[in-house]
């Protein structure tokens, strides 16, 4: 069965992208490579990052694509490829990946969800910002450095102490 993705031009999408090895901390250990990958891809394939959180072995982000553009798959391929090329070749690679000339850094697939309305958008932004607390990396979203939470506070969209009392995940 062929997997079908919903590609709607100019839409907003929530993504979960995960490393193959869930016990590593490559994303936070090499955050500068990941940032550079996003910057480089956005230069030729613009999109808006509405919210993002980078955890050691996975990330969540919400993007809005430009009008007349639905190519998020191309963007992810380029981001993942750029990041991977910056790392030494010391990961375990299975036979299937070897045959295809792939690295063993990222899971091949990722989760995407098209945002349906403003409430759906807000629910996913909240999920993104609360995720470091959910995974036990910190007690407050404000304490996790790899999150758009700080930008949302600077812009007056969230208070600094949002969800700081240990309220359960959205």
Image (cartoon, grey):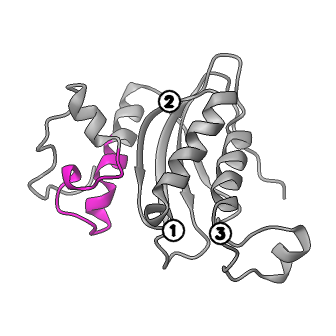
Identify the residue position indicated by label 2 in the image.
116
Lower position in the chain sequence, tag 2 or tag 3: 3
Q: Relative to 8, is 113 on the left or the right?
A: left
Considering depth in this image, is 134 or 41 the residue closer to the camera? 41
In the figure, 55 relative to 65: above or below? below
Residue 148 position, x and y percent, is: 35, 41
- Crowding around mark 2 (Cα neighbors within 10 Å: few <14, some 14 to 19, many 20+) is few
- Residue shown at the point (39%, 25%) measured from the top left: 118
Q: Which SS class for mark 2? A: loop
The label nearer to you, 2 versus 3, is 3
Q: Which SS class for mark 1? A: helix
Identify the residue position indicated by label 1 in the image.
26
Considering depth in this image, is 96 or 31 the residue closer to the camera? 31
- Crowding around mark 1 (Cα neighbors within 10 Å: few <14, some 14 to 19, many 20+) is many
Q: Quadrant of residue 1?
A: bottom right
Residue 60 seen by the camera:
yes
Q: Is residue 20 magenta?
A: no
Identify the residue position indicated by label 3 in the image.
105
């Amino acid at each position: 069965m062929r997997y079908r993705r919903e590609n709607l031009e100019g839409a907003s999408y929530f993504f979960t992208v995960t490393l193959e090895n869930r016990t590593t901390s490559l994303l936070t250990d090499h955050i500068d490579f990941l940032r550079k990958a996003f910057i480089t891809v956005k230069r030729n394939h613009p999109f808006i990052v509405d919210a993002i959180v980078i955890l050691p072995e996975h990330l969540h982000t919400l993007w809005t694509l430009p009008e007349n553009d639905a190519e998020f798959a191309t963007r992810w391929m380029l981001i993942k490829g750029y990041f991977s090329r910056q790392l030494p070749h010391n990961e375990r690679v299975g036979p299937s990946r070897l045959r295809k000339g792939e690295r063993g850094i990222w899971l091949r697939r990722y989760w995407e969800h098209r945002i349906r309305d403003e409430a759906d958008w807000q629910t996913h932004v909240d999920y993104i910002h609360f995720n470091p607390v959910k995974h036990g990396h910190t007690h407050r979203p404000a304490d996790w450095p790899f999150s758009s939470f700080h930008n949302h506070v600077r812009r007056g969209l969230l208070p600094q102490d949002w969800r700081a009392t240990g309220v359960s995940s959205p």
